[in-house]
Amino acid sequence: MEQLTPLINALKRYWKADLRRLTFLAALVMALVTARTTSGPRLALSLGSIASPDPRSAYRRFQRFLAWPGLDGEGYARFIFALLRPQGLLLVMDRTEWELGKSKVNLLMLAFLYQGLAVPLFWSFLPHDGNSSTPERIALMERALAFLRAHFPHLRVEGSWRIGSS
C-alpha cells in the first residue's frame, strides 16, 4: 500500500472520494500498467490483496468500482493526461464484455496508445449484448473530442476510421 501513496495523493486533486476508493483507483491504474490489458478478469488478478486474495471477489469489486457514479470519465482523463503527459494521441476504440455473475457487462472503451499500451480514456456501458452500433461509437467519440478540444485548444484531429459491422 505504501507504494500507492504518491498516486493516491495525486488522485485526491481530481476526485472527492474516500480513501478506500482512491486506494482502489490507484491500484487499478497500477494494474493497467503492469497487466497491460483492459480485460476485467486479468485486471482483477493484478489488483492483488488491494481488492481481495480471491480472484472472483476482486473481479466483483472491480465491477462495482466501474459502476460507481463518482468515477466520471473527465476526472479520470484529466488525471491520466496529467500523469502521463502524452505528446501525441492515437485513439483506439474497442468493445469488451465481462460476466457479472449471471449478467453481462458490455463496455465500449476509447483508449489512447502510450508506449505500446492502450490506456482507457472514456467508456460507455452498452445496454445490450453484442457489438456496438455506429451511433454509440459516434457518441463516445464526440464526448471524448469535446473533452480533448476543451483541454487541448491546439488539438488537430485527423485519422482514418475503420467501422466494424453493427
Image (spheres, helix red, strand yellow):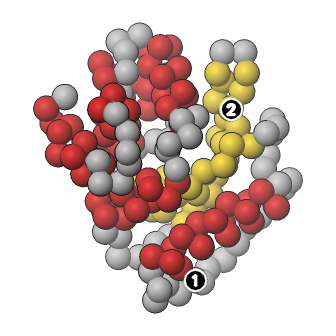
Residue at 73 percent across and 63 percent down: it is: 139
Q: Which residue is outermost to the top?
A: 54
What crowding class fits label 1: few (fewer than 14 Cα within 10 Å), some (14-19), or many (20 or more)?
A: few
Horizontal arrangement in the rendering, residue 39 relative to residue 36 (left or right): right
**Quadrant assignment, res 13:** bottom left
Q: Is residue 7 visible?
A: no
Local SS, label 1: loop
Q: Which residue is mark 1?
A: 157
Percent position (x, y) of residue 64? 54, 27
- Name which residue type carries label 1: Val
Where is 101 relative to 141, above or below? above
Horizontal arrangement in the rendering, residue 80 relative to residue 111 (left or right): left
Where is 149 relative to 73, above or below? below
Residue at 82 percent across and 38 percent down: it is: 128
Q: Is residue 82 visible?
A: yes
For the N terminus, which image quadrant?
top left
**Quadrant assignment, res 106:** top right
Which circle marks residue 105 in the picture? 2
Q: Which residue is outermost to the left?
A: 2
Where is 64 relative to 75, above or below? above
Sooner in the amino-acid sequence: mark 2 or mark 1: 2
What crowding class fits label 2: few (fewer than 14 Cα within 10 Å), some (14-19), or many (20 or more)?
A: some
Which circle marks residue 6 in the picture? none
Q: Is 158 or 7 nearer to us in this picture?
A: 7
Residue at 37 percent across and 39 percent down: it is: 17
Horizontal arrangement in the rendering, residue 56 relative to residue 34 (left or right): right
Q: Is 1 or 71 nearer to us in this picture?
A: 71
- Name which residue type carries label 2: Val
Q: Is 35 or 107 nearer to us in this picture?
A: 107
Q: How many marks?
A: 2
Percent position (x, y) of residue 141? 66, 66
Percent position (x, y) of residue 25? 37, 38
